[in-house]
Amino acid sequence: MTTRSSKRRSLSELAALVSDGDSITLGGSFLHRGPNALVRELIRQARRDLEIVKQSPGYDIDLLCRAGVATRAKTGIVAMEGNYGLAPHYRRAIESGALALEEHACATLTAGLRAAAFGVPFQPCAGIDGSDLARLNGWVRLDDPYQPGRSAWVIPEIRPDVAVIHVNEVTPQGDARVTGTTHWDRIMTRAAGKVLVVAEREVPVAEFQARPELTLVPHFLVEAYAVVPGGAWPGSCWPEDEVDYPAIDAYLEEGEAALQRHLAAAPETKEATRA
């Protein structure tokens, strides 16, 4: 039995730790290992005016734009991957002005998160020359103080209020680990003010102690977690789940009824995972 002193919460309780107006960075990439159960719960709880920070969002930001939850974003590439192309509701939100965008490259967004994680006001970043991003965002180029004649663009710190990631395993203390690629989850969890974790399953602390080098996020960084098997649906969470392409096809159908059918079909709607 889980006690209230534990960091374990229901999905609805976990989502309640996100406030209207928060800046949220979401783990995973495109259709893979996104914290989608919590994203859907934010919609059910009618959260508003959220900022989304992510190098390569897709379904997650598209859904939040479709539901009118996200109004601001700092993103790199945004797409539903090759099968579907651009994220349609995100694109409409940008074109209509419903979503205010600070456009980044994946590298510049990572640099801003690194600055926050390292406790410095900005982070140098290469590869910006020839792009309009510096002009659009007001980024500054600084002279190299060690070698005259050289300079570098610097990206101001990006410090989200909340990082939310989906992981394979979590301990009762809140340690979290991922099977396979971790995408940008490590730097996201170091840059944000607090970290929320959604996990496929809870495992004993002893399993983490046997392989401590596999721990992605240590418990002292995690404020709370929920266990939601299949919570990355309709995206993948290797090796448990592959992308559910028929579910994405259904999600992309137009209309409020299609959206409500999609939300109702999600794995977390089962009572066992919401309790």
Image (tube, grey):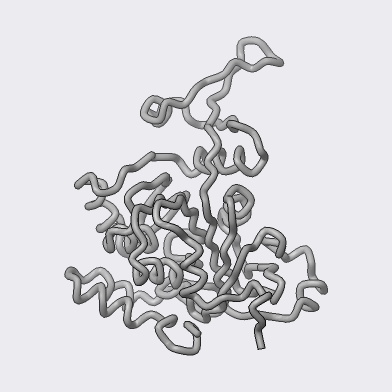
Q: Residue furthest left?
A: 255
Residue 218, compared with residue 226, is above or below; it is: above
Residue drawn at the location 59% of the way across and 56% of the way down: 194
**Of 200 and 195, which appears nearest the observer?**
195
Residue 111, compared with residue 83, is above or below; it is: above
Residue drawn at the location 42% of the way across and 26% of the way down: 138
Residue drawn at the location 82% of the way across and 74% of the way down: 210
From the top left corner, tell me how far across and down residue 221 is, in percent: 67, 58
Horizontal side of 41 relative to 123 (left or right) equals left
Q: Residue furthest front?
A: 4
From the top left corner, tell me how far across and down residue 158 is, in percent: 52, 41
Horizontal side of 90 relative to 112 (left or right) equals left
From the top left corner, tell me how far across and down residue 189 is, in percent: 61, 54
**Of 197 and 84, which appears nearest the observer?**
197
From the top left corner, tell me how far across and down residue 28 is, in percent: 51, 61
Q: Residue furthest top?
A: 148
**Of 76 and 120, which appears nearest the observer?**
120
What quarter of the picture does the N terminus occupy?
bottom right
